[in-house]
Amino acid sequence: MRKRLYNRLAWDGIGKNWKLYFPYILSCVLTIAMYYMIRSLAFNDEVQAMRGGDSVALLLVLGSWVVMIFAVIFLFYTNSFLMKRRQREFGLYIVLGMEKRHLCRVIARETIYIALISLGLGLLAGISLDKLMLLLLTRALGGEAALGFRLSGEAMVSSLILFGVIFCLILLNSLRQVRKTAPIELLKAESYGEREPKAKWLLALLGGLCLGAGYAISQVVDDPLEAMFWFFVAVVLVIIGTYLLFTAGSIALLKLLQKNKRYYYKARHFVSVSGMMYRMKRNAVGLANICILATMVLVMISTTASLVAGAEQAVTLRYPYDLANDGTDEYTAAWLSQKTAEEAAARDAAVTEEVSYSYLAMYVLRQEDVFVTSSVDGSPEEVAYTEGVAYVITLEDYNRLTGESRTLAGDEILLYVSKTDYEEDTLTIFDRTYTVADRVDSFLGNGRVVAYIYPSYCIVVRDEAQLAYLEESSIYDPAVFWGADLDADDETKIQIYQALLQAASEENSYVLSLECQAWERDELVSIYNGFFFLGVFLSVLFMIAAILVIYYKQISEGYEDRRRFEIMQKVGMSRREVKRSIRSQVLTVFFLPLAMAGVHELFAMSIILQFMDALMLASHSIYYITAAVCFGAFAVAYALVYALTARTYYRIVSPAGAMDTMAA
């Protein structure tokens, strides 16, 4: 009998609070489905067999860990909201004679029912949509998916274990809250927090310092390797600063406005400031969550979309010639020139352009205008930590390949710098100081200069004697770059490329580092498309979370404002004044996270672009344009979510419909 009673109370609790539980269950279902799909795709043999599939599979595995961490945090957060909204109901059960252990059994059954529904529907949705996601991913990678239906045992087991553990932890946390709370506290739980909030100046100051430090780090870090570490430091500081500013900083600011008597003691300002103070106290954490989620969506979509938009330019920048071989000797370059002409002629193709030049590459540690590198006499010893690579060629080769007729005197040099700035007028290597006569815009089409994660310093010296001096002083050997363009379609270029590799293997005399633009294009574009696919996938997940947080925030504010609306009318304010005051507060609070997310992304651009440079983004303007478009589209979607969730808010504020006009 008792079991039936507990079961009925559990189902009644879910049914009577369906407006609260439906979006929660829906979010659980979607999160489970998305986790199943991303795990299934990560271990799909078809994906791994495609060009660039291994890299994409690794990205998907990393993405599954992001979803896992997000699921724990998000589901705990939403469940805590549900528990808070139902504490009055739980308190009433206890007052009517139910013991806490009986209430815990009801809550346990509710959690089990929700877990079973969510896991069942989530896995069903994931399995049903898995093939569609595979088709979209294979299309993005330029491959084809086999027909047929596939069930991933690994993804299913992983999903059941992960979300089974999450629901168990949620249940334990809910039981802990009920057991430690007195019945009278449960009854009055929704009324707590009505006292005027106190300003926490120290936390507000700490929030400002954290946010400022995060912004400062993103602006001052200019080393690509250091940026990878400091980016995460900046992210943590910005997240902490965001939460502190929303929870403590907003109250502190409103307190300052309250102390300004000329501003505060006006009817419009008095109501707005007071209302915002209570509103921010109750919803600060939710607003901070929305802000962080919005920032994550904006950053992921902007970066991955800009990579896809600039993919073709990145291919051309990284592989400027149809065929290129770097780092060998003149003998190998001559063999490549002859063999390429033969293979091209055999396929009715032709070599339209060919370049070859010698250079010296040295790993360097920059100290202002002094470049420290390893020398043959052991002073300094081999450079273990580098800050860049110096490429040195002669003026004769530079003029021959560019068609220019520049001249240099004495120890003058021409300089091209990639991925950093160099403002000094001199440059010292070993014991010789060179004067920077001019700075050039490019460096002879060597794609490895672009691909290298370190800054590159491309130096043009006056003659062979100066190049020979650097060769004799350093431990590094000179190398030869060879490149050629072909008059042929991509398929023929790939055939010639493979024929050259086969010939070098058969003759056993040539060690090649040969690259083919047509061959590499597919893999590079596949990796970029994989980034975009994962970015969209995670952005959808974070958007779902943001929508759910917004929905619950609207419900919470609706119940609070209904009481406030009645009180303000009783003290003499007209209905029009009340509606105007509440609407202005709702709009301000609602769009504050969006504005803050835009500021976060704006300050993050500097450090993000360093990562984009490492991924060979051809132009920063691509990112700026993409980021602006993404922010505009997100703002429209955000406003649409507001319009849809506001209907629930206004129905709660005025059940009889007296406030419906506020939504207009």
Image (tube, helix red, strand yellow):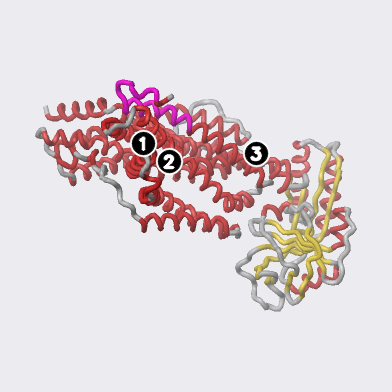
Is 115 placed left or right of 586 in the picture? left
How far apart in space, not on screen, are marks 1 and 2 (Cα)? 10 Å
User: Pointer 2: what residue?
Assistant: 290
Please, which residue is most extreme toward the right here?
Answer: 405
Q: Is residue 57 visible?
A: no
Task: Using the image, determine if residue 231 lies above or below residue 368.
Answer: above
User: Pointer 1: what residue?
Assistant: 553
Label 3: how many residues lie within 10 Å, few (<14), some (14-19) or many (20+)?
some
Task: Using the image, determine if residue 164 lies above or below residue 131.
Answer: below
Q: Residue placed at 55% from the left, 40% from the top?
A: 301
- Give, as a three-letter code, the residue at label 3: Ala
Label 1: how many residues lie within 10 Å, few (<14), some (14-19) or many (20+)?
some
Residue 149 counted in the magenta span = no
Image location (x, y in percent) of residue 95: 11, 35
Q: Main secondary structure of the magenta part?
A: helix
Q: Earlier in the sequence, mark 1 or mark 2?
A: 2
Is 382 placed left or right of 590 in the picture? right
Task: Using the image, determine if residue 609 lies above or below residue 165.
Answer: below
Tag shown at residue 309: 3
How far apart in space, not on screen, are marks 3 and 1 (Cα)? 36 Å
- Give, as a three-letter code, the residue at label 1: Lys
Label 1 close to label 2 by CB (< 8 Å): yes
Magenta residues (range)? 639-661
